[in-house]
Amino acid sequence: MNCTRRNFLIGGSTTLFLSGYFPKISFASMQKKNLIIISLRGGMDGLTAVPVIGDKRLKKLRKKLILEDVLNLNSDFGLHPKLEIFHKLWQKNQAAFVHATNIPYTGRSHFDGQNLMETGAHIPYKEKTGWLGRGLLASNIIGKGLAISLPMPLLLRGVPQNNNFFPSPDFVETKLIDQIYNEFKGEHNELIKSTLDTIRQRPLSMQIATDSDDRKKLALEAAKQLKDQSGPRVAVFDLDGFDTHAAQGGVDGAHADELEEVNKIVTILHENLGQAFDNTLILTLTEFGRTIKQNGGYGTEHGYGSAILMAGGLLKKSQVYTDWPGLKKKELFEGRDLNSTIDSRSVYNSAMSICFNQDPEFLRKEVFWGDELPDLSQELFKI
Amino acid sequence: MSLNFYRRVAFGLSPNETPDKDPLNWAINQLDTIPDLLWPGTIPTEKDLRKKYGEWVYGDREVLRKKFKNDKHAYRKAKDELRIKTGERYFELNEHAIRHFQTKYSKQPVFERFWLFWGNHFAISEKDFLAEFSTGPYQREIIRPNMVKTFEEMVQSVTTSWCMIHHLDNSESFGPNSKKGMEWGETINENHARELLELHTVSPNAGYTQEDVIQLAYIMTGWAHKWDRKNLETGDIWFDQEMHQKGDKIVLGVKYKNDAKRELAKVIHDLATHPICIKFVSTKLCRHFITDEPTDEMIKPVIEAWNKSNGNLIEIHKAVITQAYKYNEITHKFHPPEIWLMQLSRMFDLNIPLSFEKMNYTFKSKPNNRQRQLSWILREIGHSPYRAKQPNGWSDLEVDWVSPELLLRRFWFASVELPMLVKSGNRSHNFILACLKNNFEDHENMESLIENFRFGTSDYDLGQKYGVICNLPGVLKI
C-alpha cells in the first residue's frame, strides 16, 4: 500500500478556484451532457466494491467476506468481479473510483443518512429539496430530470417538472387529465398541478405500458431518452438492498448481488447511449460505508467512508482517486470504519459543474450553502 | 361540518351509510373497543404462519438446496412446488383481503385508520419472507390488541415480537462479554436498538449518541428467537441469558443496573414516556390526520391528553380526532394510494376484496389471478402495505407520493381497473350520483364533469367517469 495523502495534494485542486472560471465554448460544450446518479441505498461497502489489495488487517477482520478473483485495477486496489463493465471501461479511461469518501455524516442511521445524501445538508430532514434538483434549478435547466422509480426521489426535488418513468401495465388516456386540469386551484394544489403539467408534456415513447420489474427495459428507455439531444439531461436510478447485516458474502453474497445490479444498469446505459456515452457521467451515491470488521451474521454494520463508482466519457482518466486514510485501528473512524477523507459532495458539485456547464464556485454557493468543497473537476473530469 | 371529515378520519361513507348528526361524537365513540375482524375466510394465527415460514425456509435451505445441488432445473421446480405447499405465494394475498375487508365493512372505521397508522409507525419493511408470512399476523396480533392499552405497552409488545426481532436482526446481537459472545467471538448488532430509539420512540431529536445506541443494544442482547435445527430462525422469542451483556448500562444518562431480562422493560418505560418521544409520536399522529406540517398549536392538546392519561392510547386517539375535527375546514391532507383505494372501495362499494369463498386456497396450485388481484393493484399503485422499503415505513408526506408515474397509476387504476370492480347492480349513472352526494359537498360540480357519459354503462364509459372523479383534487386530498 503506497497510496498516500501526497497523491491528493499533487494536481492542485485550487487552480480553477483562483483563476476564476471561463467555460470553453467549443463544439463539445454545445453537446448535451448527461449526468446519471445511481443511488445505492442501505450503505454500499466501498471495501467490497473496490477492495484494497494485500491489507493483512482487512483479511483478518473479514475472514468470511474475503473476495477471490478480484479484478485488477492498480497496485493498490482491485475491483469486485461482478463489476465487470467498470473493469472494461477502465481499460478505455472511462471508469474511475473515488475512495474513502462520504457525505459529512457520521450518525449511522439509514434514514438520516439517505436524507442527507439526497439533500446534501448537515441536519437530517431540515432541507426539503435535493442537491441535484437545486443544481438544475441554479443552472436554469428545467424539466430535464428523469427518475427511474415510482416515487420522485428527494434528490431531484427542488426543480419543477421532473419526469419519472416506471410505466403502468396498461396505457393511460392522458386526455382524462385535460378534463380535470382546471379543477386544481389554489396553492395547496400546486404540486399536483405542476406534476400534471409534466405528464402532459411527456414524449410519446414514455406513454407506453411495460413491465416495470424489468430493470433492463427501464434502463434501455432511460438511455433512449438521454441520447435524444432534446431529452432529459439528468437521470436518477434507485437501488436498495445494500444493507447487508447478514450473509454479506464475498464473490456471490448479498452485496455481490446488488453490485451486479449496478453493473447491469451501467452495461445497458453504455451499450445504448452509443456516442452519447462520451458526453455522460455516471456516479453512484450512498449514505455510508460499512464497518471494517464482519459481524455475528457474516455481515457488516453501518460505517462511514465508502466509495463512488464512476463511468462515462467525461472522466479524465481511469484512476482510484483517494487520500487513503489507512486501515490501522487508530486510522479508522471511531476505531471501526474506513474514514472519509474526501467530502463526496465535492465530487458531485464538480460533476454538476461539468455536466451543467456551470461555475463550480457558483454551484457550491447555490447548492451547498457555500460549504468548503474543493473543485475536483480538473482531477476527475474532462474540462 | 364538511362531509370530507368522514374521509379525513375514516374511509368515507358507503352507499348504505348516512352522515351522522354529530360527526365528532360519531368518530370518538369508535375508539374505546377493538372491533372484531370481520373477514369470514381463514384468519391464521401468527404462530401457525411462523410454522409455515419455518417449513418453507427449512424445506428450501436444508432440504432442496442439498438434494438438488447439481440440478438447477429440478431445484427450481421443487422450490415452486414447496412455495405452493407452504402457502408462500398465498398468505400475503389473504392478509391484504383481511385488511381491506376490515376497512371496508368495519363499524368502527376510525379505529381502523389508527390501526393502519400504528402498523406503519412500527413498520416491518420488506425483508426475507416477512411480508409473505409474518407482517400481516403481526399487524393483527401485536399492533391491534395494544390499541386500547398504553403506548408503553405497545412498544413492549412490538419490541419483543418475533416479527420485529427478526426484521431488525436482534437475534444476531451478542453481548461481547456474554457467555456465547466470548465463546464465539461475537458482538452486537445495533440495528434494532437504533430503530427503537430513532423510529419507535424518542427520535433523533433526543440527541442520543452512538454510545447510547451501543448501550441500548447491550440491554437488548439475549432477546432472540430460540434456534433449533428444524425451525431454524422461526422459533419463539425468549431471553437467552448466555447472549446477554453483563454489567450496568447507561442510556440517555439513565443507569440500568445489571438485571438480565428485566432491563429491557425498564428502558422501554423510560423511552416511551420521554417527553421528546411523546412530542415526536404526537406530531406523527397529527401529520397523519391533520396536515403534513402540523403546528405546535395543533399538537399541544394531543401531548396534554398523553400526559394526563399516562400514555393511554384511547385518550390519545380521541384527542387526535378532536384536533382533526377542529382543523377540518382549514387544513388539507393528501392520501397515500392505499387509503385512497380503501376510500373508493367503501364509497362506491367496489368488488374488492374477492369473496372469502373464492379466496379459499387448496395449497395445490399457484393462487389464481383473481386471488392475486387486490395485492397486484396495491403494488401497481405504488403502495403494497407490507412491503415498505425501509423500517421507517411509508411516508405520510404529499411530496413523497406525487410524481408523474404515481399519479398516472391512479388514472390507470380508476379508468382501466376500477370499472371491472363495479358490482353489476351499481353500473347506473344514478348510483354514482348518489355516492357523490353522500360524500362530497361539491357533488354538483363533480356531476357536471361526467355529464357527457351519463347514458353510458359500458366498462369504457365507467372508466371515463371514474377516471375523472377519482382523481379530482377533492378526492386525492381532503
Image: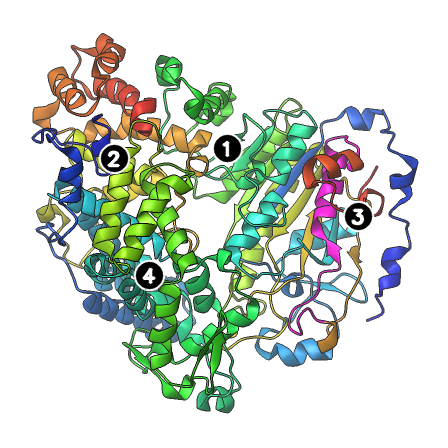
Q: Residue at x 57, y 54 (%)?
A: A113
Locate residue B439, reporting x and y percent: 19, 25
Q: Which residues are magenta?
A: A332-360
Q: Are marks 1 and 4 in contact (CB under 8 Å)?
A: no
Q: Secondary structure at mark 4?
A: helix
Instruction: Specify the quadrant of the image occupied by residue A235.
Output: top right
Q: Nearer the viewer, mark 4 or mark 2?
A: 2
- Magenta-colored stretch includes residue A357: yes
Q: CA distance from mark 1 to mark 4?
A: 29 Å
Q: Secondary structure at mark 1?
A: strand
Locate residue A166, reporting x and y percent: 46, 36
Q: Label 2 amino acid? A: Tyr
Q: Label 3 amino acid? A: Asn
Q: CA distance from mark 4 to mark 2?
A: 36 Å
Q: Secondary structure at mark 2?
A: helix
Q: Which residue is mark 1?
A: A164
